[in-house]
Image (cartoon, rainbow, N blue to C red):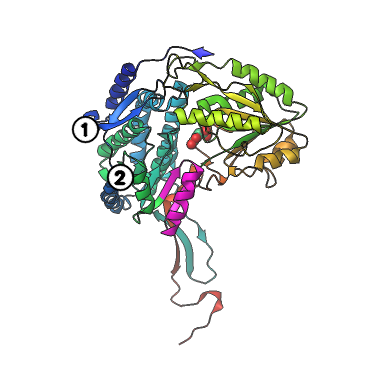
Amino acid sequence: MAHSSIPTGAELQQLAIETARRCGVDVDAAAGDTTTGSPINGERLSSLAWTDATAVDDVVERAHGAFLEWRKVPAPARGALVKRLGELLAEHKDDLAALISLEVGKITSEARGEVQEMVDICDFAVGLSRQLYGRTMPSERPGHRLMETWHPLGVVGVISAFNFPAAVWSWNTAVALVCGDPVVWKPSELTPLTSLASHAILARAIAEVGAPADLSQVLIGGTDIGQALVDHPGVALLSATGSTRMGRAVGPRVAGRFGRSLLELGGNNAAIVSPSADLDLTTRGIVFSAAGTAGQRCTTMRRVIAHSSVIDEVTERLVSAYGRLPIGNPMAEGTLVGPLIHRAAYEAMESAIAQAGSEGGKLVAGGGRTLEDEAPDAYYVRPAIVRIDEQTSVVEQETFAPLLYVLPYDDFDEAIALNNGVPQGLSSSVFTTDQAEAERFVSAEGSDAGIVNVNIGTSGAEIGGAFGGEKETGGGRESGSDAWRAYMRRATNTVNFSGELPLAQGVDFTI
Ligand code: UN1
Protein backbone atom coordinates (compact mmCIF):
# COMPACT_ATOMS: atom_id res chain seq x y z
CA MET A 1 0.00 0.00 0.00
CA ALA A 2 1.61 3.29 -1.06
CA HIS A 3 1.32 5.96 1.55
CA SER A 4 1.58 9.74 1.26
CA SER A 5 3.65 11.79 -1.13
CA ILE A 6 7.43 12.07 -1.13
CA PRO A 7 8.89 15.48 -0.22
CA THR A 8 11.32 17.27 -2.55
CA GLY A 9 15.05 17.53 -2.03
CA ALA A 10 14.86 21.23 -1.22
CA GLU A 11 12.22 20.66 1.47
CA LEU A 12 14.28 17.99 3.17
CA GLN A 13 17.53 19.97 2.96
CA GLN A 14 15.90 22.98 4.53
CA LEU A 15 14.49 20.88 7.36
CA ALA A 16 17.85 19.16 7.91
CA ILE A 17 19.78 22.42 8.17
CA GLU A 18 17.27 24.11 10.47
CA THR A 19 17.05 21.08 12.71
CA ALA A 20 20.82 20.56 12.93
CA ARG A 21 21.20 24.25 13.85
CA ARG A 22 18.62 23.94 16.61
CA CYS A 23 20.67 21.07 18.07
CA GLY A 24 23.71 23.37 18.16
CA VAL A 25 25.55 22.31 15.00
CA ASP A 26 27.57 25.07 13.37
CA VAL A 27 26.29 24.16 9.94
CA ASP A 28 28.48 26.68 8.10
CA ALA A 29 31.67 25.49 9.77
CA ALA A 30 30.73 21.86 9.04
CA ALA A 31 30.02 22.49 5.35
CA GLY A 32 32.20 20.88 2.72
CA ASP A 33 31.99 18.94 -0.48
CA THR A 34 31.13 15.40 0.51
CA THR A 35 27.45 14.89 -0.11
CA THR A 36 25.08 12.53 1.63
CA GLY A 37 21.62 11.72 0.39
CA SER A 38 18.32 11.08 2.11
CA PRO A 39 16.80 7.63 1.58
CA ILE A 40 13.39 9.36 1.60
CA ASN A 41 13.89 10.69 -1.94
CA GLY A 42 17.42 9.59 -2.82
CA GLU A 43 18.45 13.20 -3.33
CA ARG A 44 21.25 15.20 -1.76
CA LEU A 45 20.60 16.08 1.88
CA SER A 46 23.89 17.53 3.12
CA SER A 47 27.34 18.55 1.89
CA LEU A 48 29.85 18.34 4.67
CA ALA A 49 33.59 18.48 5.18
CA TRP A 50 35.20 15.12 5.77
CA THR A 51 38.26 14.61 7.81
CA ASP A 52 40.62 11.67 7.37
CA ALA A 53 42.81 9.29 9.32
CA THR A 54 45.55 11.89 9.73
CA ALA A 55 43.32 13.58 12.32
CA VAL A 56 43.16 10.51 14.54
CA ASP A 57 46.49 10.86 16.41
CA ASP A 58 45.70 14.36 17.57
CA VAL A 59 42.11 13.52 18.47
CA VAL A 60 43.14 10.48 20.53
CA GLU A 61 45.84 12.49 22.26
CA ARG A 62 43.35 15.19 23.22
CA ALA A 63 40.90 12.54 24.40
CA HIS A 64 43.67 11.08 26.54
CA GLY A 65 44.27 14.53 28.04
CA ALA A 66 40.59 14.70 28.96
CA PHE A 67 40.84 11.22 30.43
CA LEU A 68 43.63 12.25 32.80
CA GLU A 69 41.31 14.91 34.25
CA TRP A 70 38.03 13.05 34.09
CA ARG A 71 39.26 9.91 35.85
CA LYS A 72 39.88 12.03 38.97
CA VAL A 73 36.30 13.28 39.08
CA PRO A 74 34.16 11.13 41.43
CA ALA A 75 31.79 8.89 39.51
CA PRO A 76 28.59 10.46 40.95
CA ALA A 77 29.88 13.88 39.82
CA ARG A 78 30.52 12.39 36.37
CA GLY A 79 26.89 11.32 36.51
CA ALA A 80 25.87 14.99 36.69
CA LEU A 81 27.16 15.45 33.13
CA VAL A 82 25.13 12.52 31.86
CA LYS A 83 22.08 13.78 33.73
CA ARG A 84 22.33 17.07 31.84
CA LEU A 85 22.87 15.19 28.58
CA GLY A 86 19.66 13.24 29.18
CA GLU A 87 17.71 16.45 29.83
CA LEU A 88 19.00 18.07 26.66
CA LEU A 89 18.28 14.96 24.60
CA ALA A 90 14.71 14.96 25.91
CA GLU A 91 14.38 18.65 24.95
CA HIS A 92 15.67 17.89 21.45
CA LYS A 93 13.78 14.63 21.02
CA ASP A 94 11.80 15.81 18.00
CA ASP A 95 14.84 17.43 16.40
CA LEU A 96 17.05 14.38 16.66
CA ALA A 97 14.19 12.15 15.56
CA ALA A 98 13.71 14.31 12.46
CA LEU A 99 17.39 14.02 11.57
CA ILE A 100 17.23 10.24 12.03
CA SER A 101 14.21 10.06 9.73
CA LEU A 102 15.92 12.28 7.17
CA GLU A 103 19.18 10.35 7.11
CA VAL A 104 17.99 6.79 7.78
CA GLY A 105 14.37 6.87 6.58
CA LYS A 106 12.95 5.70 9.93
CA ILE A 107 9.29 6.38 10.58
CA THR A 108 8.74 9.15 13.11
CA SER A 109 7.54 6.87 15.90
CA GLU A 110 10.61 4.66 15.61
CA ALA A 111 12.94 7.64 15.28
CA ARG A 112 11.44 9.10 18.45
CA GLY A 113 11.83 5.67 20.04
CA GLU A 114 15.52 5.74 19.19
CA VAL A 115 15.92 9.10 20.94
CA GLN A 116 13.94 7.76 23.90
CA GLU A 117 16.53 4.97 24.17
CA MET A 118 19.15 7.72 24.47
CA VAL A 119 17.24 9.46 27.26
CA ASP A 120 16.71 6.12 29.00
CA ILE A 121 20.37 5.10 28.86
CA CYS A 122 21.30 8.47 30.36
CA ASP A 123 18.92 7.80 33.28
CA PHE A 124 20.40 4.35 33.63
CA ALA A 125 23.97 5.66 33.56
CA VAL A 126 23.22 8.37 36.14
CA GLY A 127 22.02 5.65 38.54
CA LEU A 128 25.02 3.55 37.61
CA SER A 129 27.36 6.38 38.56
CA ARG A 130 26.61 5.52 42.20
CA GLN A 131 26.71 1.76 41.66
CA LEU A 132 30.07 0.92 40.09
CA TYR A 133 30.43 -1.77 42.69
CA GLY A 134 33.46 -3.93 43.33
CA ARG A 135 33.38 -7.02 45.52
CA THR A 136 35.19 -7.76 48.72
CA MET A 137 36.22 -11.37 49.24
CA PRO A 138 37.26 -13.11 52.43
CA SER A 139 41.05 -13.29 52.51
CA GLU A 140 42.54 -16.63 53.49
CA ARG A 141 45.11 -14.81 55.61
CA PRO A 142 44.52 -13.23 59.01
CA GLY A 143 44.67 -9.43 59.13
CA HIS A 144 44.23 -9.08 55.38
CA ARG A 145 41.54 -7.57 53.22
CA LEU A 146 40.90 -8.76 49.66
CA MET A 147 38.82 -6.58 47.38
CA GLU A 148 38.45 -5.32 43.85
CA THR A 149 38.17 -1.74 42.65
CA TRP A 150 36.99 -0.53 39.26
CA HIS A 151 38.84 2.30 37.60
CA PRO A 152 38.30 4.30 34.41
CA LEU A 153 39.79 2.45 31.44
CA GLY A 154 40.86 5.11 28.93
CA VAL A 155 39.78 6.38 25.53
CA VAL A 156 36.77 4.57 24.06
CA GLY A 157 36.48 4.47 20.26
CA VAL A 158 32.93 4.03 18.99
CA ILE A 159 32.20 2.89 15.44
CA SER A 160 28.47 2.94 14.76
CA ALA A 161 26.21 1.85 11.91
CA PHE A 162 23.61 3.78 9.92
CA ASN A 163 20.56 2.01 11.31
CA PHE A 164 20.80 3.24 14.91
CA PRO A 165 22.86 6.33 14.21
CA ALA A 166 22.38 7.97 17.60
CA ALA A 167 21.22 5.37 20.16
CA VAL A 168 24.21 3.07 19.79
CA TRP A 169 26.55 6.02 20.37
CA SER A 170 24.55 7.00 23.44
CA TRP A 171 24.63 3.49 24.96
CA ASN A 172 28.40 3.61 24.73
CA THR A 173 28.85 7.26 25.59
CA ALA A 174 26.52 7.58 28.60
CA VAL A 175 28.10 4.51 30.19
CA ALA A 176 31.68 5.44 29.20
CA LEU A 177 31.32 8.93 30.67
CA VAL A 178 30.15 7.75 34.09
CA CYS A 179 32.90 5.11 34.00
CA GLY A 180 35.41 7.95 33.55
CA ASP A 181 36.24 7.46 29.86
CA PRO A 182 36.24 9.95 26.96
CA VAL A 183 34.72 8.92 23.62
CA VAL A 184 35.98 9.31 20.06
CA TRP A 185 33.18 8.57 17.64
CA LYS A 186 33.36 7.41 14.02
CA PRO A 187 29.73 7.33 12.90
CA SER A 188 28.39 5.82 9.69
CA GLU A 189 29.21 7.86 6.59
CA LEU A 190 25.48 7.87 5.88
CA THR A 191 24.42 9.74 9.01
CA PRO A 192 26.73 12.74 9.55
CA LEU A 193 24.06 15.26 10.60
CA THR A 194 22.56 13.01 13.27
CA SER A 195 26.08 12.47 14.59
CA LEU A 196 27.03 16.14 14.58
CA ALA A 197 23.75 17.00 16.30
CA SER A 198 24.16 14.34 19.00
CA HIS A 199 27.73 15.47 19.58
CA ALA A 200 26.70 19.15 19.72
CA ILE A 201 24.10 18.36 22.38
CA LEU A 202 26.73 16.57 24.47
CA ALA A 203 29.21 19.40 23.88
CA ARG A 204 26.64 21.80 25.33
CA ALA A 205 26.15 19.60 28.40
CA ILE A 206 29.94 19.36 28.82
CA ALA A 207 30.31 23.15 28.66
CA GLU A 208 27.44 23.72 31.08
CA VAL A 209 28.82 21.43 33.78
CA GLY A 210 32.43 22.51 33.18
CA ALA A 211 33.77 19.09 32.14
CA PRO A 212 36.77 18.74 29.76
CA ALA A 213 35.71 19.63 26.21
CA ASP A 214 37.66 16.75 24.67
CA LEU A 215 35.56 14.14 26.46
CA SER A 216 33.50 13.91 23.28
CA GLN A 217 34.88 14.07 19.76
CA VAL A 218 33.35 13.04 16.48
CA LEU A 219 35.14 12.34 13.23
CA ILE A 220 33.08 12.68 10.06
CA GLY A 221 34.72 10.74 7.27
CA GLY A 222 35.38 7.35 5.73
CA THR A 223 36.52 3.90 6.77
CA ASP A 224 40.17 5.00 7.03
CA ILE A 225 39.23 6.76 10.28
CA GLY A 226 37.72 3.60 11.71
CA GLN A 227 40.83 1.66 10.74
CA ALA A 228 43.08 4.21 12.44
CA LEU A 229 41.02 3.92 15.64
CA VAL A 230 41.19 0.14 15.44
CA ASP A 231 44.99 0.24 15.24
CA HIS A 232 45.63 3.12 17.63
CA PRO A 233 47.32 1.99 20.84
CA GLY A 234 45.72 4.94 22.65
CA VAL A 235 42.21 3.53 22.13
CA ALA A 236 41.69 1.30 25.15
CA LEU A 237 38.28 -0.02 24.12
CA LEU A 238 36.97 -0.18 20.58
CA SER A 239 33.22 -0.63 20.49
CA ALA A 240 32.08 -1.47 16.97
CA THR A 241 28.59 -2.07 15.64
CA GLY A 242 28.09 -3.27 12.08
CA SER A 243 28.41 -6.27 9.82
CA THR A 244 30.09 -9.54 10.70
CA ARG A 245 32.53 -8.80 7.88
CA MET A 246 33.53 -5.57 9.59
CA GLY A 247 33.84 -7.35 12.95
CA ARG A 248 36.06 -10.01 11.45
CA ALA A 249 38.46 -7.27 10.37
CA VAL A 250 38.25 -5.28 13.61
CA GLY A 251 38.37 -8.00 16.29
CA PRO A 252 41.74 -9.61 15.47
CA ARG A 253 43.42 -6.25 14.85
CA VAL A 254 42.38 -4.84 18.20
CA ALA A 255 43.32 -8.13 19.88
CA GLY A 256 46.69 -8.01 18.06
CA ARG A 257 47.62 -4.88 20.00
CA PHE A 258 46.03 -6.29 23.18
CA GLY A 259 43.27 -3.68 23.07
CA ARG A 260 39.77 -4.46 24.17
CA SER A 261 36.95 -4.72 21.68
CA LEU A 262 33.21 -4.86 22.09
CA LEU A 263 31.56 -6.19 18.96
CA GLU A 264 27.88 -6.01 18.09
CA LEU A 265 27.56 -7.56 14.65
CA GLY A 266 25.01 -9.30 12.47
CA GLY A 267 21.86 -11.07 13.53
CA ASN A 268 19.64 -13.67 11.89
CA ASN A 269 16.91 -13.70 14.44
CA ALA A 270 14.15 -16.28 14.56
CA ALA A 271 10.81 -16.76 16.27
CA ILE A 272 9.42 -20.19 16.98
CA VAL A 273 5.62 -20.32 16.78
CA SER A 274 4.26 -23.25 18.73
CA PRO A 275 0.79 -24.82 18.27
CA SER A 276 -0.35 -23.24 21.55
CA ALA A 277 0.63 -19.68 20.54
CA ASP A 278 -1.88 -16.83 20.71
CA LEU A 279 -1.86 -16.09 16.98
CA ASP A 280 -3.19 -12.53 17.24
CA LEU A 281 -0.37 -11.52 19.51
CA THR A 282 2.11 -13.62 17.51
CA THR A 283 1.18 -11.95 14.23
CA ARG A 284 1.55 -8.46 15.69
CA GLY A 285 4.86 -9.40 17.28
CA ILE A 286 6.24 -10.84 14.06
CA VAL A 287 5.10 -8.00 11.81
CA PHE A 288 6.69 -5.32 14.00
CA SER A 289 9.98 -7.23 14.26
CA ALA A 290 10.13 -8.36 10.62
CA ALA A 291 8.79 -5.37 8.67
CA GLY A 292 9.39 -2.55 11.17
CA THR A 293 12.36 -0.26 10.47
CA ALA A 294 12.07 -1.70 6.92
CA GLY A 295 13.88 -4.78 8.20
CA GLN A 296 17.01 -2.78 9.00
CA ARG A 297 17.56 -3.52 12.67
CA CYS A 298 20.23 -5.94 13.74
CA THR A 299 17.42 -7.44 15.84
CA THR A 300 15.01 -7.67 12.88
CA MET A 301 13.21 -10.99 12.72
CA ARG A 302 14.39 -12.82 9.63
CA ARG A 303 13.03 -16.32 10.27
CA VAL A 304 9.75 -17.74 11.57
CA ILE A 305 9.90 -21.40 12.57
CA ALA A 306 6.26 -22.44 12.81
CA HIS A 307 4.80 -25.78 13.87
CA SER A 308 3.44 -27.62 10.86
CA SER A 309 -0.07 -27.59 12.39
CA VAL A 310 -0.16 -23.76 12.43
CA ILE A 311 2.24 -22.76 9.66
CA ASP A 312 -0.50 -22.22 7.07
CA GLU A 313 -2.58 -20.06 9.35
CA VAL A 314 0.46 -18.08 10.53
CA THR A 315 1.50 -17.51 6.92
CA GLU A 316 -1.98 -16.39 5.89
CA ARG A 317 -2.22 -13.95 8.76
CA LEU A 318 1.22 -12.53 7.95
CA VAL A 319 0.44 -12.22 4.24
CA SER A 320 -2.78 -10.41 5.07
CA ALA A 321 -1.05 -8.04 7.53
CA TYR A 322 1.77 -7.36 5.02
CA GLY A 323 -0.84 -6.42 2.43
CA ARG A 324 -2.07 -3.67 4.75
CA LEU A 325 1.31 -2.13 5.66
CA PRO A 326 1.41 1.57 4.80
CA ILE A 327 4.70 2.09 2.90
CA GLY A 328 5.97 5.55 2.07
CA ASN A 329 7.30 8.84 3.36
CA PRO A 330 8.51 7.88 6.83
CA MET A 331 7.79 11.36 8.18
CA ALA A 332 4.10 11.22 7.20
CA GLU A 333 1.60 10.19 9.82
CA GLY A 334 0.42 6.63 9.50
CA THR A 335 3.40 5.27 7.55
CA LEU A 336 4.75 2.07 9.05
CA VAL A 337 7.42 1.15 6.49
CA GLY A 338 9.89 3.70 5.16
CA PRO A 339 12.55 3.26 2.48
CA LEU A 340 15.63 1.08 2.41
CA ILE A 341 18.85 2.94 3.03
CA HIS A 342 20.11 2.69 -0.58
CA ARG A 343 20.04 0.86 -3.86
CA ALA A 344 22.55 -1.79 -2.74
CA ALA A 345 20.18 -2.80 0.08
CA TYR A 346 17.36 -3.22 -2.42
CA GLU A 347 19.57 -5.27 -4.74
CA ALA A 348 20.66 -7.50 -1.88
CA MET A 349 17.01 -8.12 -1.02
CA GLU A 350 16.09 -8.95 -4.60
CA SER A 351 19.04 -11.26 -5.03
CA ALA A 352 18.22 -13.08 -1.77
CA ILE A 353 14.63 -13.56 -2.96
CA ALA A 354 15.91 -14.97 -6.25
CA GLN A 355 18.36 -17.27 -4.48
CA ALA A 356 15.61 -18.46 -2.12
CA GLY A 357 13.54 -19.29 -5.21
CA SER A 358 16.36 -21.42 -6.57
CA GLU A 359 16.73 -23.15 -3.19
CA GLY A 360 13.09 -24.23 -3.07
CA GLY A 361 11.49 -21.17 -1.49
CA LYS A 362 8.23 -19.59 -2.62
CA LEU A 363 7.60 -15.85 -2.44
CA VAL A 364 4.14 -15.51 -0.84
CA ALA A 365 4.10 -11.78 -0.09
CA GLY A 366 5.79 -8.58 -1.19
CA GLY A 367 9.11 -8.20 -2.94
CA GLY A 368 9.95 -5.56 -5.51
CA ARG A 369 9.88 -1.78 -5.37
CA THR A 370 7.06 0.61 -4.89
CA LEU A 371 6.82 4.41 -5.36
CA GLU A 372 9.60 4.29 -7.98
CA ASP A 373 7.71 6.74 -10.21
CA GLU A 374 7.44 9.33 -7.48
CA ALA A 375 10.92 8.74 -6.08
CA PRO A 376 13.08 7.08 -8.73
CA ASP A 377 16.26 7.40 -6.67
CA ALA A 378 14.73 6.10 -3.43
CA TYR A 379 14.22 2.43 -2.65
CA TYR A 380 10.84 1.70 -1.15
CA VAL A 381 10.18 -2.02 -1.14
CA ARG A 382 7.28 -4.25 -0.25
CA PRO A 383 8.27 -6.32 2.79
CA ALA A 384 8.54 -9.91 1.60
CA ILE A 385 7.71 -13.36 2.96
CA VAL A 386 9.21 -16.55 1.57
CA ARG A 387 7.88 -19.98 2.54
CA ILE A 388 10.71 -22.46 2.50
CA ASP A 389 10.91 -26.00 3.87
CA GLU A 390 14.55 -26.05 4.83
CA GLN A 391 17.13 -23.76 6.28
CA THR A 392 19.10 -23.43 3.06
CA SER A 393 22.20 -21.31 2.59
CA VAL A 394 20.30 -18.09 1.81
CA VAL A 395 18.31 -18.48 5.05
CA GLU A 396 21.55 -18.71 6.99
CA GLN A 397 22.67 -15.30 5.73
CA GLU A 398 21.68 -11.94 7.14
CA THR A 399 20.01 -9.90 4.39
CA PHE A 400 19.56 -6.40 5.79
CA ALA A 401 16.07 -5.81 4.39
CA PRO A 402 12.47 -6.78 5.19
CA LEU A 403 12.66 -10.37 4.01
CA LEU A 404 11.15 -13.02 6.26
CA TYR A 405 11.53 -16.77 5.78
CA VAL A 406 8.81 -19.04 7.17
CA LEU A 407 9.94 -22.60 7.90
CA PRO A 408 8.07 -25.60 9.33
CA TYR A 409 8.96 -27.83 12.29
CA ASP A 410 7.38 -30.88 13.86
CA ASP A 411 8.92 -31.23 17.26
CA PHE A 412 10.25 -28.62 19.63
CA ASP A 413 13.83 -29.95 19.68
CA GLU A 414 13.93 -29.56 15.92
CA ALA A 415 12.66 -25.98 16.26
CA ILE A 416 15.41 -25.15 18.75
CA ALA A 417 17.99 -26.75 16.46
CA LEU A 418 16.77 -24.59 13.56
CA ASN A 419 16.78 -21.47 15.74
CA ASN A 420 20.41 -22.20 16.67
CA GLY A 421 21.44 -23.54 13.27
CA VAL A 422 22.76 -20.26 11.84
CA PRO A 423 26.15 -18.58 12.33
CA GLN A 424 24.69 -15.52 14.07
CA GLY A 425 23.40 -15.39 17.66
CA LEU A 426 21.81 -12.06 18.49
CA SER A 427 18.08 -12.35 19.25
CA SER A 428 15.37 -15.00 19.35
CA SER A 429 11.77 -15.52 20.46
CA VAL A 430 9.27 -18.21 21.16
CA PHE A 431 5.54 -17.65 20.89
CA THR A 432 3.86 -20.23 23.09
CA THR A 433 1.45 -20.59 25.98
CA ASP A 434 3.05 -23.88 26.98
CA GLN A 435 5.16 -23.03 30.01
CA ALA A 436 7.49 -25.99 29.63
CA GLU A 437 8.33 -24.94 26.05
CA ALA A 438 8.94 -21.37 27.12
CA GLU A 439 11.23 -22.52 29.92
CA ARG A 440 13.13 -24.89 27.64
CA PHE A 441 13.67 -22.11 25.14
CA VAL A 442 15.26 -19.86 27.76
CA SER A 443 17.22 -22.71 29.39
CA ALA A 444 20.82 -23.81 28.74
CA GLU A 445 19.50 -26.30 26.17
CA GLY A 446 17.39 -23.67 24.45
CA SER A 447 18.20 -20.67 22.29
CA ASP A 448 21.92 -19.91 22.00
CA ALA A 449 21.33 -16.19 21.30
CA GLY A 450 22.19 -13.25 23.53
CA ILE A 451 18.56 -12.14 23.63
CA VAL A 452 15.94 -14.82 24.27
CA ASN A 453 12.32 -13.66 24.43
CA VAL A 454 8.97 -15.25 25.20
CA ASN A 455 5.80 -13.95 23.55
CA ILE A 456 7.38 -10.82 22.14
CA GLY A 457 9.32 -10.31 18.92
CA THR A 458 13.08 -10.28 18.50
CA SER A 459 13.52 -6.50 18.19
CA GLY A 460 12.90 -3.50 20.39
CA ALA A 461 14.94 -4.47 23.45
CA GLU A 462 14.85 -2.20 26.50
CA ILE A 463 18.11 -0.46 27.46
CA GLY A 464 18.14 -1.96 30.98
CA GLY A 465 19.32 -5.36 29.77
CA ALA A 466 22.73 -6.17 28.34
CA PHE A 467 22.48 -5.96 24.54
CA GLY A 468 24.47 -8.19 22.19
CA GLY A 469 24.89 -11.77 21.12
CA GLU A 470 27.03 -14.81 20.55
CA LYS A 471 28.83 -16.52 17.67
CA GLU A 472 29.20 -14.26 14.62
CA THR A 473 27.32 -11.52 16.47
CA GLY A 474 30.64 -10.92 18.20
CA GLY A 475 30.02 -11.62 21.90
CA GLY A 476 29.98 -8.00 23.11
CA ARG A 477 27.39 -6.58 25.49
CA GLU A 478 26.39 -2.93 25.53
CA SER A 479 23.84 -0.81 27.33
CA GLY A 480 22.33 -2.07 30.62
CA SER A 481 22.95 -4.68 33.32
CA ASP A 482 26.69 -5.00 34.00
CA ALA A 483 27.82 -4.08 30.47
CA TRP A 484 29.63 -1.13 32.15
CA ARG A 485 32.43 -3.47 33.20
CA ALA A 486 33.82 -3.45 29.65
CA TYR A 487 34.42 0.30 30.05
CA MET A 488 36.49 0.00 33.26
CA ARG A 489 39.55 -1.83 34.43
CA ARG A 490 39.46 -3.99 37.51
CA ALA A 491 42.19 -3.98 40.12
CA THR A 492 42.38 -6.70 42.77
CA ASN A 493 43.76 -5.35 46.03
CA THR A 494 45.16 -7.29 48.97
CA VAL A 495 45.72 -5.07 52.01
CA ASN A 496 47.71 -6.42 54.93
CA PHE A 497 47.04 -4.78 58.31
CA SER A 498 48.41 -7.66 60.43
CA GLY A 499 52.00 -6.63 61.03
CA GLU A 500 53.01 -10.16 59.94
CA LEU A 501 53.72 -11.45 56.46
CA PRO A 502 51.86 -14.72 56.04
CA LEU A 503 52.07 -15.95 52.44
CA ALA A 504 49.11 -17.26 50.50
CA GLN A 505 48.77 -21.00 49.91
CA GLY A 506 50.77 -21.54 53.14
CA VAL A 507 54.09 -20.99 51.36
CA ASP A 508 57.08 -20.85 53.71
CA PHE A 509 59.81 -18.43 52.57
CA THR A 510 61.63 -17.62 55.79
CA ILE A 511 64.89 -15.80 55.24
C1 UN1 B 1 20.56 -2.27 16.23
O1 UN1 B 1 19.79 -2.60 15.34
O2 UN1 B 1 21.80 -2.12 16.00
O3 UN1 B 1 16.53 -3.98 20.30
C2 UN1 B 1 20.15 -1.95 17.62
C3 UN1 B 1 16.37 -3.17 19.38
C4 UN1 B 1 16.88 -1.78 19.61
C5 UN1 B 1 18.32 -1.66 19.24
C6 UN1 B 1 18.70 -2.23 17.92
N1 UN1 B 1 16.73 -1.44 21.00
O4 UN1 B 1 15.82 -3.44 18.34
Quadrant in which the N terminus appears: top right
Badge 1: few (under 14), some or many (20 or more) residues near its Cα, within 10 Å? Answer: few
Q: Depth check: 47 or 65 in front?
A: 47
Residue 360: give x, y in percent of width and height: 69, 31
> Quick one: which residue is furthest to the front in this view?
358
Residue 473 vs residue 407: left or right? left
C-alpha span from label 1 to label 2: 21 Å
Residue that carries the numbered disc 2 in the rendered image: 215
Which disc number belongs to residue 29?
A: 1
Residue 56: give x, y in percent of width and height: 29, 48
Residue type indicated by callout 2:
Leu
Residue 85 vs residue 306: left or right? left
> Quick one: which residue is furthest to the bottom in this view?
511
Q: Which residue is drawn at the image coordinates 34% and 29% (left, top)?
A: 36
Q: Which residue is drawn at the image coordinates 55% and 78% (left, top)?
A: 506
Residue type indicated by callout 1:
Ala
Question: In terms of secondary structure, where does tag 2 sit?
Answer: helix
Range covered by the magenta-colored residues: 238-263
Which disc number belongs to residue 354?
A: none
Q: Residue 257 colored magenta?
A: yes
Q: Residue 264 colored magenta?
A: no
Residue 8: give x, y in percent of width and height: 35, 15
